[in-house]
Image (spheres, rainbow, N blue to C red):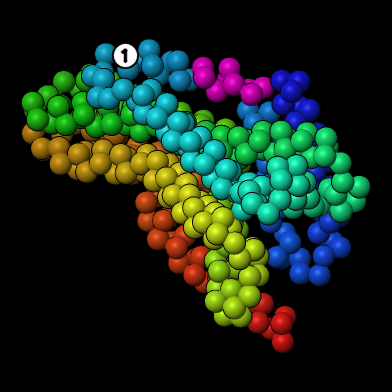
Amino acid sequence: MIVSVILALLSALQVVLCFYYLTQQVDKFASSTEFVYVTTVFIYRVFFLRISMKWRDFLKPWAEIDLMMSNYPVLEKYHRKMKLIAFVFIFFAVGEHIFFMFSKGLYNLDQNFVENLDSYFQAIFNFIFFIIPYNRCLGCILQVLNWFSTLTWTFADIYLVVVTIPLTFRLRQINKKLKFLIRHQIKDENQWQNIREHFFQVTQICEHTENYMTHVLTVSFCNKLYVVLYQLLGFIREHQTKLYYFYDPNFFSRLYFGVSFAIILCRLVTVTWFSASIDSESQDIAKSLFSVPSDIYNTEVERFVLNITVSPPILSGFKMFHMTKSLILKIATSIIVYELVLIKFQTKVNI
């Protein structure tokens, strides 16, 4: 906890220094990437500190539903999936960061290692060494902090994906049992009441979970949209003017651009897909309920249908957008529209 607080305070200091650096630049949009990055990391750390202090309250309803649904069949080992997701995210984050380090001059055959290190530190921490004189030891300390920032930035996406997997798993279990009741023509209202109450509990946990992730989800989406727009604008400007607007024309810079752009898109789609799986499973349950034969239809089935129709489990970002799979296409459309606006705006500024 103490280390987390210290890192959050250091992030706040970086935000202040980066904001001052940004105010001194002519093209503020082209120079805004560092400010957006350090601000995002700072916000993540504040949110995770809040979540950590309420973590026991977060897990309590989960323990209750685990006990309540212990007799349901285990359809998959979702713990293994959670570990695999975390490994894949960290693996690609480390790989992307290595490409980033090389793209900023860490690997230059015309210089020795110390000179490369100095060039690298001055390039990525320009908002700090713009204010204070360059110091190699300080650069090493800042690099360690930068690694922690990269882990924080990556952990936010891991957190968003991992907390949705158990919810999807529970809904899939309910749907499996629901199909079993329909297939075997079960008329016992007690069994229908149990499955309806279990579904209601999962819905409550979905709302409970949303309270612990909606802040991170909203910031994550805003940050990813900014990065995609920023990189696309730089790419388009380069081909329009034959100038390298946001990055240097070396091999590692081009390679890093391609890798980072692909990774950020994959992250955006992955977070959306897993979060939207809750809505997909809910729709499958609704389809199963609508197919209940009339000879076993009862009051509990009617209440179940009303429950899933009025308040289906679904995640959202402050209720401003809901996590459905159609959101991926909406995001793609928004990126195109915003990119055209930015291109038009940049053209007017240059004129």
Judging from the image, what secondary structure is the residue with disc 1 in?
loop
Residue stretch in magenta: 52-60
Where is the N terminus found, in terms of image quarters?
top right
Q: Is residue 307 above or below residue 332?
A: above
Q: Main secondary structure of the magenta part?
A: helix
**Residue found 24% across the figure and 32% down from its top:** 175
Quick one: 279 or 262, which is closer to the camera? 262
Q: Is residue 10 above or below residue 343?
A: above
Q: Is residue 146 visible?
A: yes
Q: Is residue 229 left or right of residue 69?
A: right
Residue 50 lies left or right of residue 23; in this view the side is left
Spot occupied by residue 308 in the image (x, y as percentages of width and height): 33, 39
The answer to if 54 sits in the magenta stretch is yes
Up the image or down, 209 lies above or below 121; here it is: above
Is 86 within the magenta?
Answer: no
**147 or 104, nearer to the observer:** 104
Q: Report which residue position mark 1 lands on.
A: 70
Residue at left 54%, top 38%?
94
| Visible residue check, residue 314 | no
Residue at image position (72%, 26%) is 4
At which x and y percent is residue 145?
72, 35
Question: How many neighbours does mark 1 have within 10 angstroms: few (below 14), some (14-19), or many (20 or more)?
Answer: few
Residue drawn 76% across the image and 35% down it? 140
Residue furthest to the bottom in view is 351
Q: Quadrant of residue 230?
A: bottom right
Screen quadrant of the C terminus: bottom right
Q: Is residue 220 left or right of residue 149?
A: left
* Amino acid type shown at disc 1: Ser
